[in-house]
Amino acid sequence: MKKWIKAVLLAVVVCGAAAGAAVAMTPPPPQPPVLPPPPATRAVSAAVIDGNTGEIYADKDGNARINPASTTKILTCILALEEGHGLLDADAVISPRAMAQDGTNLGLRPDLPLSLREVLYGMMLVSGNDAAVAVAETVGGSYDRFIEMMNEKSASIGVSHSHFANPNGLTDPDHYTTARDMVKIARYAMGNPEFRDIVREKTHNMVYRDGMYRIVENRNEFLDSGYPGANGVKTGMTDAAGECLVASAEQDGRLMIAAVYHDEERWEDVKVWLDYGFQAARMEAAYEAALAAEPPFYKWVNQMLGREPHA
């Protein structure tokens, strides 16, 4: 009996020694990256999101309520492409309400009909406020119904700090969003190939029903900035919103989207914030690669010791 006990004790000691040796020999697991502080910006509010994963890497007062100005048209456009897809080649409704809009306009007239598709280009490139109302009344059947659809769509995307009261972004106390919400909306919109095709265009040959055409130019100077992979998205400016921009770029298959609001340095600031996002994505990818390359035995020991989470 005593010999049996001694054998058990010896086995325990040996196993303990082996376990101790295994622990001592096992290197610590790869450590998650520690991101640097977000870049400085003159923007009142800003955010950057990974378009592939949906991770928001940084923000500055990202949940602060702001006026979205014409970046509103990102939501208007994607909603039109989804809910009005069958109407894209039909004539857009051009009402007195559309023609009466303040600010930048495309110059819509009932005697110069355009397809809904062409009006979308006019809305996103020229930033026509009249075009946005024409889109709303064509797709929604009525202006008010389209506004309801905007808020329904934003909620389905996962936006929770916004409310939309018009399709173009003209100032209204009931029309607001946040930088974090807007990059989420932009990420969703950029998942649609037709949306991407529209917002990446620097110029567009707009053809009217009577065969007349005009060349419209994109007001988004970021596309001509030389930033690698620049491919969208939308500018905005009102007295209440200041200068704002939602910008996107794709590098090595990775889409990054940055938004800055009330920012006089918007063209440069979005570059810095996109750089930050791409750097963060590379750090995350290197960490994931290191985890995947960790030998299974080391991973098991580290998980048993609580030094590494279980998959």
Image (cartoon, grey):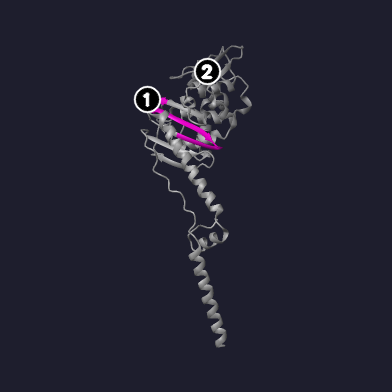
Q: Distance between the residues labelled 1 and 2?
A: 25 Å
Q: Do the residues labelled 1 and 2 touch (CB within 8 Å)?
A: no
Sequence order check, earlier mark of 1 and 2? 2
Vertically, is 141 above or below 17? above
Nearer-the-camera pick, 265 or 67: 265
Between 292 and 202, which is closer to the camera in this rendering? 292
Q: Which residue is drawn at 52% across and 66% down?
A: 22
Residue positioned 52% across, 51% down in the render = 290
Query: Of helix, strand and loop, which mostly describes the magenta segment?
Result: strand
Residue for point 49% across, 60% down: 27
Q: Which of 200 and 206 is in front in this view?
A: 200
The residue indicated by pointer 1 is 239
Q: Which of marks 1 and 2 is in front?
A: 2
Magenta residue span:
237-258
Residue 271: in magenta span: no
Which x, y percent locates residue 85? 61, 28
Q: Residues within 10 Å of mark 2 (few under 14, many from 20)?
A: some
Instruction: Estimate the x, y position of residue 106 in percent, counting from the top left.
Output: 50, 17
Relative side of 80 to 275, left or right: right
The kind of secondary structure element at disc 2 is strand
Of the residues shown, which amino acid type is indicated by label 2?
Answer: Val
| Quarter that holds the C terminus | bottom right
Residue 20 located left or right of residue 92: left
Is 62 drawn above or below residue 20 in the view shown?
above
Q: Look at label 1 and name its amino acid.
A: Asp
Percent across and percent down for residue 98 are: 50, 19
Q: Which mark is residue 216?
A: 2
Q: Could you tell me which secondary element the residue under label 1 belongs to?
A: loop
Q: Could one spot residue 178 in this view of the protein?
A: no
Q: Residue 268: name its quadrant.
A: top left
Q: Let me know if residue 253 is in the magenta part.
A: yes
